[in-house]
Amino acid sequence: MILQSDTEAWKAARVGRVTASRICDMLAKTKTGWSTSRTNYAAELIVERLTGGCGESGYVNAAMQWGIDTEPHAIAAYEFREGVTVAPAAFVIHPGVEWAGASTDGFVGDDGLVEVKCPLTSTHIENLLSQRVPPKYVTQMQWEMACTGRRWTDFISFDPRLPERLRFFSQRVERDDAVIAQLEKDVEIFNAEIEDTIKQLERHGD
């Protein structure tokens, strides 16, 4: 487990690995087959595995920076409401699947995680009105539980621009072992495709 506060080690641990935040890119499909999101993600991981460097640009837009700056306030609000302490975020390597891991937003007790989103106000309003976790985040959270062995994750949507009574939405997602087993198979297939492409590229480089 590598704490996110150790930025360089955290970045290095992620290099070449399928991560929870990108699991939906790996699974993305169109009516005719796999989406370009999968192809592009595979290409990023191929570059990282061949070079050992991080393929991410490091670019942070205004919305991303808002999320970074606001996340601690969301966690503080959650801790106050639930009467718990959230342990620091970390990157956890999957215990059984190669080239795979997940970045958590925090640990709760022995069994829980938190997944924090500080989205656009329009998105937060959708979360409040629907009272449900968007499906793409459910998949992300299941993969985080696959890597950490945790039993549940509390999804948090937080927007301090709204009145206090409307700033916070949280819903728990329980671990689904059947979903996790399928995700593990999907990641193994994806990784096999990546490794096959790397072998082909290395033959071209001879």
Image: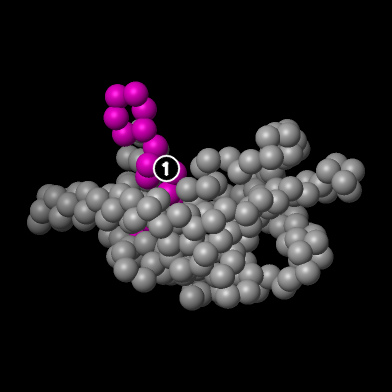
Name the residue: 87% across, 46% down.
165
Locate the C terminus and report the quarter of the image it occupies.
bottom left
Q: Nearer the viewer, residue 14 or 80?
A: 80
Q: How many marks?
A: 1
Give the residues in magenta.
16-34
Q: Is residue 140 above or below residue 73?
A: above
Q: Is residue 158 above or below residue 147?
A: above
Nearer the observer, 103 or 203: 103
Residue under the point 40% across and 51% down:
179
Mark 1: which secondary structure?
A: helix
Q: Quadrant of residue 37?
A: top left
Image side of residue 56 versus residue 50, left or right: right
- Between 90 and 46, the residue placed more toward the observer is 90
Colour scheme shown: one colour
Q: Which residue is mark 1?
A: 25
Q: Check disc 1 and give the amino acid type.
A: Asp
Question: Percent x, y for residue 140?
Answer: 49, 51
Q: Position of residue 110 (x, y in %)?
A: 58, 75
Indicate left or right for 152 with 184 as reference.
right
Please state if 102 lies on the left or on the right of 39 as rendered. right
Residue 131 shown in magenta: no
Residue 64 visible from this viewpoint = yes
Q: Is residue 18 magenta?
A: yes
